[in-house]
Amino acid sequence: MADVHEYRIVLLGPPGAGKGTQGKLLESSLGIPSVSTGDMLREAMEKGSDLGHTARGYIQKGELVPDDLVIRMVSQMVESDRFARGFILDGFPRTLEQANSLDQILFTGGKSLSHALYFDLSEEEAVRRISGRLVCKSCQKMYHLAYNPPPPSGRCDCGGELFVREDDKEETVRNRVNVYNNQTKPLLSYYNQKGILWTIDASLSIQEVHQKVLEIVNANG
Ligand code: ADP
Ligand code: AMP
């Protein structure tokens, strides 16, 4: 089991379920870092690193980036000092191989995951959410044209410029949902068997979902 108040949390759910949004809120509430592997890969693409070049081909098609690359990226981070007191992972793991590797890395350091939070949302609603998503270039905060509109300036509240993700166009989104159903959904039973899976109704408002998450982590810390 995790030490008291040392939260090691993974966020699960279909693309568009609100993992990134909730990860950032939980980061402020718990004071531990929330990291999105999607953001890390997009940053690598932006920088033009080897990882970024390789990742781009997969991301543009809505496919998963190969396990070995993503596992290497996450394992360095999980072992760093910044993560020593807990963390929130958004978008990782996405395959059983990634889940097993994460468990191994933590086990080697005498640690384990405390919570797998599953944001349960229908496919139609997830697609609707992705269709209106805007992301801040500087702090990666998410907005939605209808559900969570940006300030009247049209910029993020940090002042950053907002953009539409390349992989948020409809055909790519459909493929991402299929990839999720085939490759990531099996993780629900993996974590259920370990007794650390909590399901949250992600169709509620952003603040209501955040409250539910806090109730769960506070009651099962
Ligand atoms: P994920 O990280 O799971 O792909 P995001 O956190 O990026 O999902 O959310 C997808 C979109 O839905 C964003 O535009 C976000 O502003 C919006 N959103 C997130 N949570 C909610 C919610 N509870 N209700 C309405 N819209 C939401
Ligand atoms: P996200 O920002 O979580 O929606 O991720 C965007 C894209 O990045 C995904 O569609 C994948 O192509 C890639 N990606 C992010 N996290 C992972 C992961 N854990 N494993 C493989 N690919 C990933």
Image (spheres, helix red, strand yellow):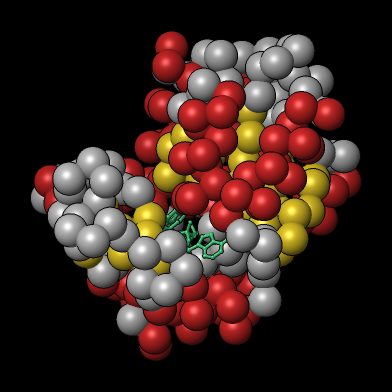
Which quarter of the figure is the N terminus placed in? top right
Please give the name of the residue rendered at 70% of the width and 15% of the height, measured from the top-left corner.
5
Q: Give 186 or 116, whichever is nearer the viewer.
A: 116
Q: Give 126 or 155, whichever is nearer the viewer.
A: 155
Above or below 56: residue 174: below
Q: Give 211 or 97, whichever is nearer the viewer.
A: 211
Percent x, y for residue 188? 76, 56
Q: Is residue 151 left or right of residue 215?
A: left
Q: Is residue 186 left or right of residue 158?
A: right
Q: Is residue 96 visible?
A: no
In the displayed orientation, state which residue is furthest to the bottom: 171
Percent x, y for residue 119? 67, 57
Percent x, y for residue 138? 20, 44
Percent x, y for residue 213? 70, 42
Please give the name of the residue rendered at 78% of the width and 53% of the height, measured from the top-left corner.
199
Q: Is residue 10 visible?
A: yes
Above or below 185: residue 34: above
Please give the name of the residue rendered at 43% of the width and 44% of the height, measured from the top-left corner.
36
